[in-house]
Amino acid sequence: MYDLNNTYLDIEKNKNGIAILPIGAIEQHGPHLPISVDYFQAESVSRAVAERMGAFLLPGIAYGNSEAHTGFRGTVSISSDTLKNIVQDITKNLFNQGFTKVGVLNFHAGNLVLKLALREVNLSSDTGVAVLCQPWQDIDEESETILDNYGNEQHAGEFETSVMMHIDPAKVGSNLIDCVPDVQSTYFDYRYMKEYCPDGVWGKATLANSDKGRLLFDAMVKATVEKLSSTFDQLNSD
Ligand SMILES: [Zn+2]
């Protein structure tokens, strides 16, 4: 694996042409988790994936589109247009210097623009391919067996709190709360989260533990490596 600690001479030894770009968000995660949870998860899972694949790990994009979390201080959002431009600039730059396979690991559901951004990049490039992975979605089957509140976990609940207890337990506070509002997850398309989850949690953080976090983390790494490997193979992008 190669990262920011390497020289350009080191990185020139990366012959498989794989680069990994983590993407997070800076937004509230309830009273018990830091605002950087999505970014921490993106960086941690991406590092494990890059190690397994012998890839070049880029520094993550910390910011995402977090407009739905407006009203909680510390949430800092960038527009979808800005995010799209940054991701397209980075992937095109990587293609231009010989990276042919880019894995974009997004950890924030509000970054909806990424699918469009990468589709445009892929259709306009004949040298490389960029694959979007959203690891929490890619382990839906595993989540169903690991989580006790499966199906009602949206934000800062059992899922994310467990993962943080595994990655860095010192970052998890003791004031865990539960909140399962009587609305569908599509409410994110219509209303600010603060209106139906005033404490910023949608899920059951009290059910979280580090064992569940380890299982979720390992499953996300495995699913992402498999998805990237099989997609790169299928597209034969060497
Ligand atoms: Zn999150």
Image (cartoon, rainbow, N blue to C red):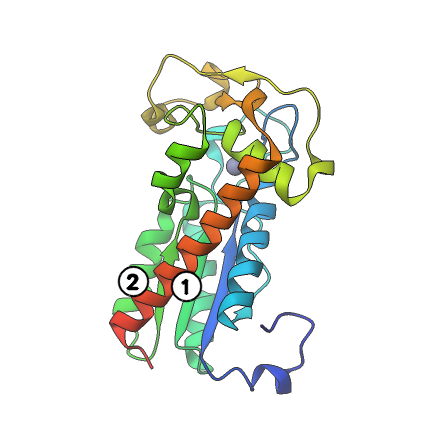
Does 82 appear above or below 137? below
Q: What is the quadrant of the N terminus in the image?
A: bottom right
Q: Position of residue 132 (x, y in %)?
A: 37, 56
- Tell me if the residue at label 2 has its CB under 8 Å from ligand 1: no
- Whole-Å distance between the Cαs marked 2 and 1? 8 Å
Which residue is tagged 1?
88
The answer to which of 72 and 52 lies nearer the viewer is 52
Q: Is residue 36 visible?
A: no
The answer to which of 147 and 1 lies nearer the viewer is 147
The answer to which of 41 and 214 lies nearer the viewer is 214
Q: Residue sitting at 42 percent across and 39 percent down?
A: 110
Q: Is residue 193 visible?
A: yes
Q: How many marks?
A: 2
Residue flagged by tag 2: what amino acid is it?
Glu
The quadrant in which residue 11 appears is bottom right
Task: Looking at this view, name the residue that lies furthest to the top.
Answer: 182
Which residue is tagged 2?
120
Q: Residue sitting at 56 percent across and 46 percent down?
A: 41
Which of the two discs, 2 and 1, labels the residue nearer the N terminus? Answer: 1
Q: Position of residue 191 (x, y in %)?
A: 39, 22
The reply to whether dot 2 and dot 1 touch (C-beta < 8 Å) is: yes
Does 169 appear above or below 186? below
Q: Residue sitting at 74 percent across and 37 percent down?
A: 170
SS class of the residue under badge 1? helix
